[in-house]
Amino acid sequence: MILSDKRIMEEMEKGTIKIVPYDRAFLGSNSYDVHLGPMLATYREHILDAKKHNEIEYFEIPEEGFVLYPHIFYLGVTAEYTETHEQVPFLEGKSSTGRLGIDIHATAGKGDVGFCGNWTLEISVKQPVRIYRGMPIGQLIYFPVDGEIEVKYSQKKDAKYAGQTNKPVESMMWKNKF
């Protein structure tokens, strides 16, 4: 079951969902549109290693936009800061974004109950496309949880992505034991 627009607004009133900045115009019948923040990042090295800290370089999207190219993996960030305390948030692409050949996440579309922060986007494209800061980039949908949560994401000692800022965050796979 997905929360409706009215239920999302009710949960925002209760404080279990927070979206900043929030604009009622971006609330659909069962989702909230999120926008591309001003920063992108790319990895410094061409070959990534899952066991090491792969560093990224940040850059701002200029006012005239920025052209994304296939075979380059970009990290972006939502302009919106969100908190979800009792629901499971999912970030999905918008159909208009997908029809431009833009994928906004490779695998990480689901958040956890208790996630607080801006969403890092894992962006790839099918052909060159110019993007702009502030453009609609995705939509958040919310699922209720069945059962009591023992430990929310923001309370986990090893929550690698808690409190993400308004800059993209690189993979923290290197912090895992394997």
Image: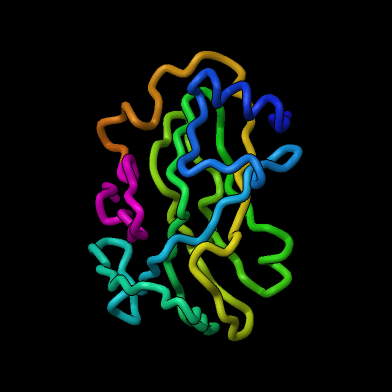
Foreground residue among 23 and 17: 23
Residue 144 is one of the magenta-drawn residues = no
Tell me what residue is drawn at x 56 percent, y 80 percent. 130
The outermost residue toward the top is: 148
Considering the whole magenta stretch, tell me its main secondary structure.
loop
Q: Going 29% across and 79% down the picture, which residue do you hit?
A: 45
Quadrant of the rendering where the N terminus is positioned = top right
What x and y, as percent, mark residue 163? 32, 41
Query: Residue at image x 62%, y 70%?
Result: 102
Scheme of colours in the image: rainbow
In the image, residue 57 lies at what x, y percent? 28, 73
Residue 158 position within the rendered picture, expressed as x and y whole percent measured from the top left: 27, 37
- Which residues lie in the magenta part? 160-178
Image vertical order of residue 128 relative to residue 154, above or below: below
**Most foreground residue, 82 or 172:** 82
Residue 105 falls in image quadrant = bottom right
Residue 62 location, x and y as percent?
A: 42, 77
Q: Is residue 18 above or below residue 50?
A: above
Name the residue located 50 percent from the left edge and 61 percent from the top edge.
36
Seen from the viewer's position, the closer of residues 111 and 19 is: 19
Q: Does the magenta run of residues contain 165?
A: yes
Q: Quadrant of residue 96?
A: bottom right
- In the displayed orientation, state which residue is furthest to the right: 29
